[in-house]
Amino acid sequence: MSEAANERSGVLMSIRGVTKAFGSNVVLKGINMDVKKGEVIALIGGNGAGKSTLMKIIMGIYDLDEGEIFMAGQPVKLGKPSASLAQGIYLVPQEPMLFPNMTVLENVLMGFHENEAELKKRLQKHMEELGFTLNLQRKASTLSIAEQQLVEILRGMMREARLLILDEPTSALTFSEVQSLFKVVEDLKRKGISMIYITHRLTEVFEIATDVAIMRDGLITLSGPVQNFTKEMLIQGLLPTDVEVSQSGHRAYQPVDYENTKPVLQVRNFSGYGFSDISFDLYPGEILGVAGVV
Ligand code: ADP
Ligand code: MG
C-alpha cells in the first residue's frame, strides 16, 4: 500500500525497513510496523529482542541507520526528542520522573507558556474525559506510582499526543490500580489515541490490546489483530527459538519423584512483618514461583 493509501485507511505511524546497529551488533534488522489510530499494539519479545531500541528510535533518542518513518502518510525525520514530541509521540515511563517538590499542576504545565487559566481548563477537560480526578495542588512526592503515571498521561494529552508508548506500566501497580489504568487506556483508545504497550504479562495482552507484534532478534516475526493469537503463540514469542512449548503452554516439565527425593528447603509456619503462616517445600530442580500483588 502507498503511504497516502495508508493514511486514508487510518494508519498513524508506519515504520519501514528500519535498521539500527551498535558497532558490529545489528540490533534492528529491518522493522516494518503500522500503528493505526486508536490501536493498542502489544509489543512482545524476550530480553534483547530490540524493543527498547525501537522505542528509543520512535522517541527520537536514537537515530535510525536505514529505513523510514511516516506519520499520517508523511515521511518524518525523528532522531531527536523534540522532533518526536512535535509529532505527538509521548512516552509514559515505567517509573515516571516528576519533580517531587512541585505540584501536579506545575509538573503537567512545565514548559507551557500560555495563559495558566486556559491551560488549567484544558487539563480539567482531559481529566474529565479520562474519568479521573487528581488534586492539582498535591506535591508530586505524595503521589503513588499509579498516580504519577496518570500525571504523565496528562502531560502527554496536554501536548496533543497521538501516540503513547507505555513501557511495562503495570509492573509496579496493585491490582485495582491496574484496573484503573486499563480504564484510562480504554478511554484513550476511544479518543483515537494510538498506543504501543510493552508488557511481559500475557493476560494483559488479551485484556487491552487490539493488536500484537512479536519481536525476536531484531525483527517483527509475527503481527496482527489480537484475535489471531493464542497464549501459546505469545509464550513462544517470548522464548528463545530452540525451546518447545507444550500443550499447556508450559515448558516440558520433568516431574519430581517426591517419594524418593528430599527437599533442599523446607519452610514451616513462617510469620513476621507482612506475612503469616507460610509453609513450602523446595525440591532439587524445581523452580518455585512466588506470585502476588504489590
Ligand atoms: P529489549 O528491550 O527487547 O530487551 P534492547 O533494545 O534493549 O532489547 O536490546 C537489544 C540489543 O541491543 C541487545 O543485544 C543490547 O545489548 C543491545 N543494545 C541496546 N542498547 C545498546 C547501546 N546503547 N549500545 C550497545 N548495544 C546496545
Ligand atoms: Mg527493553
Image: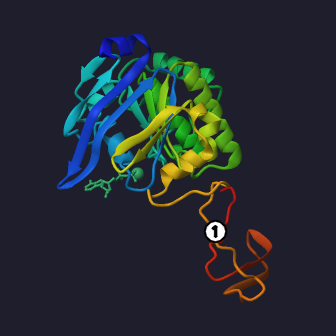
- Residue at x 60% of width, y 32% of height: 227
Query: Which residue is more in the foreground, 60 or 289?
Result: 289
Return the x and y of residue 60 as percentages of the image width and height. 28, 36
Kind of residue sitting beneath label 1: Tyr
Q: Quadrant of the N terminus?
A: top left
Return the x and y of residue 231 as percentages of the image width and height. 61, 45
Query: Which residue is more in the foreground, 92 or 218?
Result: 218
Position above or below: 109 against 71: below
Return the x and y of residue 120 as percentages of the image width and height. 51, 21
Q: Quadrant of residue 33?
A: top left
Q: Residues within 10 Å of mark 1 (few under 14, many from 20)?
A: few
> Is 218 situated left or right of 117 in this image?
left
> Is 196 situated left or right of 284 in this image?
left
Residue 142 in sight here: no
> Is 64 situated left or right of 1 in this image?
left
User: Which colour assignment does the render follow?
Assistant: rainbow
Provide the residue designation for mark 1.
Answer: 253
